[in-house]
Amino acid sequence: MSDKIPVTVLTGYLGAGKTTLLNRILTEPHGKKYAVIVNEFGEIGIDNDLVVNTDEEVFEMNNGCICCTVRGDLIRIMDGLMKRKGKFDAIIVETTGLADPAPVAQTFFMDQDVSDAARLDAVVTVADARWLSDRLKDAPEAKSQIAFADVIVLNKTDLVSGEELDAVEGRIRAINPYAKIHRTQHAKVPIAEVLERNAFDLERIIALEPDFLEEGHHHHHDEDMQSVSFRTGEVDPEKFMPWISDLTQREGPNILRCKGIVAFPDEPKRFVFQGVHMILDGDLQQDWKPGEARESRVVFIGRDLDANAIREGFLACAA
Amino acid sequence: MTATAAPSLTQNVTPLGFDANVTAAAWLKDVAAFGLGDGGVMLAKGADTHRAAAHPEGGVLVAATDGTRFVTGGDDGRVAVTGPDGATATLADANGAWIDSLAVNPSGAFAFGAGKRVRAVSDKGKERNLEVPSAARGLAFAPKGYRLAISHYNGATLWFPNLETKPEVLEWKGSHLDVTWSPDARFVVTSMQENALHGWRLLPDRGHMRMSGYPSKTRSFAWSHDGKWFATSGAEAAIVWPFESKEGPMGKAPRECGVRPAKVERVAFHPGVLILAVGYEDGCILLIRLNDASELLVRPAVKGSGITALAWDKTGRRLAFGCADGQAGILTLPL
């Protein structure tokens, strides 16, 4: 696990400041060497790092699963990069402004060779404070990028008022309640807040607990993209596992991401899971602490989610 | 006595060691050539080695040979050619785009892929370019004539670089990786992202062949010298498909050779007899005789030293191998 190379996916709508952030990461004196996978040779001037130019190629997996798409070019490039293992410490994948982050993320779950060699560290989305609200209305890609993010760099805050900034942050929170938001100008954010976050590590979900969820669910009526979250006590694994599996299979195209911590009766460890569309990854991890409330909590981020049906389905799993 | 069940040939191996992942191996008559992840090409005659700086700015991603020269594609965007004397030169330049597919024709022609672009250069030096729908993953020349198979997303393309005729597209949904022609030119076979192989029967009926059931991707395959067997990696045994009939392997079960609790990474058929060299992810190498499934141990498992390259010389006396950690070796069969 530890010798897997961490991969940071850098997304953001056109003009949000993605390249500025990338340049900042690469030019800061961190003593690390990155392999950077970019779509076009932009203005990234790097002496020390390995830049790989690629055309994004989104491939459907031939397995009957309609939302199982992967980045074919990424699989090919990872294969080549692994032949130069030891020449770099981490990988950064910059997507185009119009890219859906799902195929990149799914590549790390779907391709055995890629997941053996590398681990998805975090999806970092750069958002333009001034224009994000408009983009959320007219650009489905911009919404997906917010929904997928583990870290959101809310950039160009100098171009909006304090109230406007709070409003746009509210919009982000309505879609994605658990991403860490950094307000920046010129994408000035400490590198450690962006890289090596371990956000896709299941263990990490536990660490997010304090602001992991609020009671009930978030819902903005003007957003078709939303998050819903629920909590209950212990759940019966015989009910919960078929339910979550069926829900993600059925609603997978609409569920962009899901995460949860679940308590099973008489099980000393927590069951932790996360998913991307139809792909689910879960494990029993880390003991419940003595005296800790054995609560089960789930969150789904997606499009047109039927919050009531998900709530009823989840609550019906109660042990 | 040895601890393993198979009789051992380990005493007949000349060990070699390099500084980087061995990405490819081939023979230039009696000189073994190894492509490395650090861009070097190592030439070995017996235990004597010489390093040629084939890709000083990059790594060797792919290599091919016509028996006299070692042609390599690199992530520096160059195709380099290295001779048995260590002389190395640039054969083609793709302006920085990774070259990760390559084929060499015994006539002297060669072809390479850089992203979606495929360039073929004939034995007379005539250059032709073709753009395929998505990145070219694999290239293979037909056994006879100047014809190229190119594997890519949703199928393969057959192209006569010297003719104006439209390239022929063989369709099959999914991402196709490496490609090969059967020695009788009757079949084109690709490995796929979905842990399966796909074949097209070019004669007489354009039939499809699906060879599935692999637990992981096939990234190495080899035809027997008589063309009747097709060995593949991707399972915890070499999966060897029978191709002796005109129909190919359809409806027939493959042989499983060298079943071990480790994934097969590389396979290489002996050029003269039905003996298969099998390299595993745990570093072990076995020789397996197809007739009676008897096994000979070439290399025991070595931690972190999975087999990444295997090549027989033309005479079948010597087998070169390379590993993920830079170890390598040459087996010389006792007479």
Image (spheres, grey):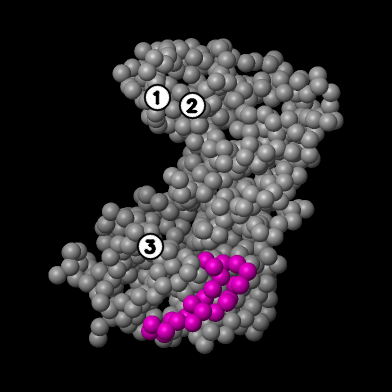
> How crowded is the residue under tag 3: few (<14 C-alpha within 10 Å), some, or many (20+)?
many
Q: Is residue B39 magenta?
A: yes
* The quarter of the displayed image where residue A15 is located: top right
Mark 1, secondary structure of its residue: strand
Pinpoint residue B89: horizontal percent, then vertical percent: 62, 81
Gap in Å between the C-alphas at discs 1 and 2? 9 Å
Gap in Å between the C-alphas at discs 3 and 1? 37 Å
Pinpoint residue A241: horizontal percent, then vertical percent: 39, 24
Residue receiving disc 3: B305
* The quarter of the displayed image where residue B13 is located: bottom left
Identified at 62% across, 23% down, the residue is: A177
User: Are discs 1 and 2 less than 8 Å apart at CB?
Assistant: yes
Is A134 left, or right, of A5 in this rendering?
Answer: right
Q: What number is the disc on residue A206?
A: 2
Pinpoint residue A14: horizontal percent, then vertical percent: 77, 40
Identified at 60% across, 25% down, the residue is: A178
Q: Tag 2, which chain?
A: A
Where B170 sits versus B287, above or below? Answer: above
Mark 3, secondary structure of its residue: loop
Q: Can residue A77 be seen in this view?
A: yes
Going by the numbered disc 1, the residue's amino acid type is: Arg
Identified at 59% across, 82% down, the residue is: B88
Going by the numbered disc 2, the residue's amino acid type is: Ile
Q: Tag 3, which chain?
A: B
Q: What number is the disc on residue B242?
A: none
User: Are discs 3 and 2 less than 8 Å apart at CB?
Assistant: no
